[in-house]
Structure formats: structure tokens, C-alpha cells
Image (spheres, rainbow, N blue to C red):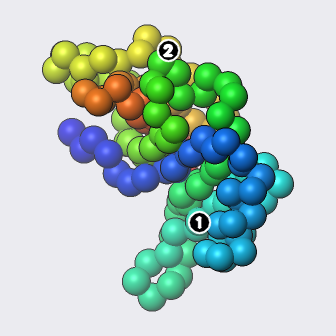
Amino acid sequence: MKRVTGIGGIFFKAKDAATLQAWYKRHLGIDVKEWGGAAFSWTDAEGKPTGGSTIWSIGPTEGDLFAPSKATFMVNYRVDDLHALVNVLKEEGCNVLDKIDESEYGKFAWVIDPEGNKVELWQPPAGQ
């Protein structure tokens, strides 16, 4: 079974999210949108678009999106079969959070790595 197929997103918390977003926009040229992040569309070696994108986002330190982790970041990994991977991770003794979300954006589950970081697993909707 294939496990991770790519990175779906990288999410950061910042003490001053607006200032940090502006810094990345000005100095690194990231097209930060009003929602606090950017979507990087995937391309092949020739620069032609391929299916998928990677989200990059900076948000405020408030909130519990990364809980129970105390980290200021979370990586979202794309997977092909979320339910199968979650079952395998549980069998392997990983700390998999009980909740699985399913919506028009796909299927999401979370596992805590050995350092206490919350890792998001995402199965995109069909065709993405």
C-alpha cells in the first residue's frame, strides 16, 4: 500500500500573523491571499499544470487547530486511501486521533508523531 503521495499543505502559527504574511509576500514573493495563505499549483518538469496544489498558510497562535500538539506548525500529507492507512497506523501502534472528517474538501485524519507533532493526513476528493 502506498502511504504518503505528496505534501498537501504547510500551516504555521505566528505571534503576529499579518506582519509575517506581509514579510513573506514582500521578500519571498508569495502571493498571500486574504485568508492568510497561498496555493501553489503543481506542474510537471516542463511547467505544465498537473492535478493538485500545496497550501501554505500562516495563522494566529490562538485556536486549537494543531492540538494536542504544542508545535507552531502542522504538515498536511496527501494519501491515496485514508481509511486503509489509518487502520495500518493503528495496527503499528501509532497515536492516531479518533476523529476522521469527511467533506467536499476530502477526507482528513490526524496522527501524532514521536516528537508530539500533529500530522494531518488528507485524501483529496476524486479527480484532485
Residue at mark 1 to residue at mark 2: CA–CA distance: 28 Å
Query: Which amino acid, mark 2?
Result: Lys
Determine the residue positioned at 63% across, 51% down. 57
Q: Is the residue 106 above or below the residue 99 in the image? A: below
Q: Is the residue 96 above or below the residue 120 in the image? A: above
Crowding around mark 1 (Cα neighbors within 10 Å: few <14, some 14 to 19, many 20+) is some
Residue 102 seen from this side = no
Query: At which x and y percent is residue 83?
Result: 38, 24
Q: Which residue is mark 1?
A: 40
Determine the residue positioned at 75% across, 56% down. 19
Q: Is the residue 74 above or below the residue 50 in the image? A: above
Query: Which amino acid, mark 1?
Result: Phe
Q: Which residue is mark 2?
A: 99
> Quick one: SS at disc 2?
strand
Query: At which x and y percent is residue 28?
Result: 61, 75
Residue 19 seen from this side = yes
What is the residue that sits farthest to the left in this orientation? 92
**Which quadrant would residue 103 be assigned to in this image?**
top right
Q: Is the residue 38 above or below the residue 101 in the image? A: below
**Which quadrant would residue 53 be assigned to in this image?**
bottom right
